[in-house]
Image (tube, helix red, strand yellow):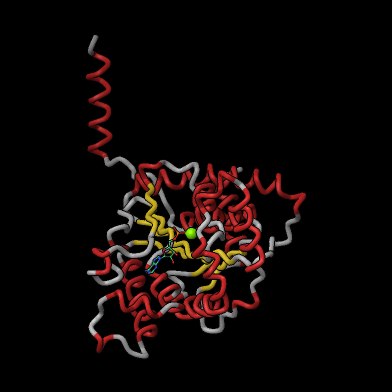
Amino acid sequence: MKLDRIIRKARTISERYCVTDGGKFDLGRIDPGDTGGLKAEDKPRAREALQSGVQALAALQDMLYAQDRWAVLLIFQAMDAAGKDSAIKHVMSGVNPQGCQVTSFKVPSAEELDHDYLWRCQKGLPERGRIGIFNRSYYEEVLVVRVHPELLERQKLPAGLVGRKIWEHRYEDIRNFERYLSRNGTLIRKFFLHVSKQEQKRRFLERLEKPEKNWKFSAADVKERDYWDDYMEAYEDMVRQTAAGHAPWYVVPADNKWFTRIVVSAVVIEALGSLDLKYPEAAKEKIAELVAARRALMAQK
Ligand code: AMP
Ligand code: MG
């Protein structure tokens, strides 16, 4: 399939899940089980489409790297077991590792807590020409920290700065930070993989039952299910407050992994496709240099 056609198709798919103006965003209207009209019997076709998506992405990334102007930042947020890791693994499987970096953000370390919360994220920002993936991000600061405000105490903030408006301030700072990045040539795309509470339970049980998945299981994750509704409110507010044309949220149905991957892949292709990427053209002097070098090489034994 031609690259142009794949990009057009990707645009159609990604538009459905895109939020650029969070004002009235209502999470309740998004069905985690949605498969965009595709059925289980379409799965093999979906897998094929993903494969051509992976190839298209590799071609686009090669140009991104060669052009060396834009950086691309992909942010993934989700409840546990929503499929962040596997979406990243599958969608990025064809890209050149040299042009791509993944940073996972865990519970902040003592050193990280000694800095402002954007500090550790800034260190992971992609250079021009590269794709940077954030597996979790500074958005944890308005998700897990909002659901468990006692975590703020460990952040060592001066007392006067922790008031009622702290979340509002964090949204504002995040909006400004993303505006700043985009004005400096970082293209931002944000994914909220939206899984249902029921499907999460099924995946946790699978982690318990399959030895090769045991390592992923954590009893603390099960405890977090008690706060499900609080998390959903925090996610909804996050999208409302931080969706923007230059930094859209994609709320991706995540009860069916094969479908999640299709949407994530479409969004990344659409994003790169929107950049009008081109291989740099050699300047006249450069071409003369290439011709001379060829002549010199040919003259050698
Ligand atoms: P996992 O991604 O499953 O390895 O888990 C990482 C854990 O780190 C999750 O439970 C996150 O909620 C937690 N985490 C990430 N960032 C923060 C943060 N800024 N403050 C507190 N917990 C965090
Ligand atoms: Mg986990």
Q: Nearer the viewer, residue 124 or 166?
A: 166
The quarter of the picture where residue 246 lies is bottom left
| Residue 3 percent across, percent down from the top left | 55, 46
Horizontal placement of 40 versus 247: left or right?
right
Instruction: Reply above or below: 196 against 297.
Output: below
Instruction: Reply above or below: 244 against 266.
Output: below
The quarter of the picture where residue 169 lies is bottom left
| Residue 251 percent across, percent down from the top left | 56, 68
| Residue 234 percent across, percent down from the top left | 49, 78
Name the image quarter holding the N terminus. Answer: top right
Q: Tell me the residue at 43%/58% (across/down).
A: 135
Number of callouts in the render?
0
| Residue 232 percent across, percent down from the top left | 55, 76
Horizontal placement of 190 versus 258: left or right?
left
Name the image quarter holding the C terminus. Answer: top left
The quarter of the picture where residue 133 lies is bottom left
